[in-house]
Amino acid sequence: MTGLQDWFIRAAGPRGLRVDLDASISLPSGAVVCVPVHLHGVGAKRGMLVATRWEALESAAKELVEVGYGYSVMSEPSPGQEELASFQDLLDDWGVSGDAP
């Protein structure tokens, strides 16, 4: 488990949000997008996909939005930068979605 995945698991659990790790999203075009984190219940109807590199999302970004996913690119947290309080700011920014936990 990466530091980013651990951060999402620790922060989302107490809020009742579901997190899928190492998610593979199959799109209608046949493209498959692999991301370390899929956070349900926020950002877009089908949740937020979190990648650590833009290249993982770039070719499918438009289609992801069309089928109801949101996405973000985040760096792995540095040791000591994993405060859970900043997770609430992230949720406030992304907003609640129709993708129930």
Image: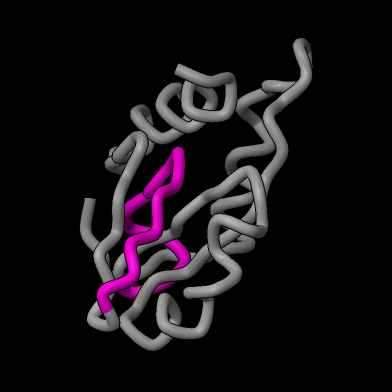
- Whole-percent x and y of residue 43? 47, 66
Instruction: Tell me which corner region of the image, top left, top right, bottom left or bottom right, holds residue 66.
Output: bottom left
- Whole-percent x and y of residue 5? 48, 28
Instruction: Tell me which corner region of the image, top left, top right, bottom left or bottom right, holds residue 12.
Output: top left
| Quadrant into which the N terminus falls | top left
- Whole-percent x and y of residue 50? 52, 50
> Taking 24 as reference, is 16 above or below it?
above
> Taking 48 as reference, is 87 above or below it?
above
Residue depicted at 33% across the width and 62% down the height: 32
> Taking 19 as reference, is 63 above or below it?
below
Residue depicted at 54% across the width and 25% down the height: 7
Residue found farthest to the front:
30
> Taking 33 as reference, is 36 above or below it?
above
Residue depicted at 63% across the width and 62% down the height: 93
For residue 35, side relative to residue 52 (left or right): left
- Whole-percent x and y of residue 49? 45, 56
Residue depicted at 41% across the width and 65% down the height: 96
Give the residues drawn in magenta, as a range.
30-45
Circle count: 0
For residue 14, side relative to residue 59 (left or right): left
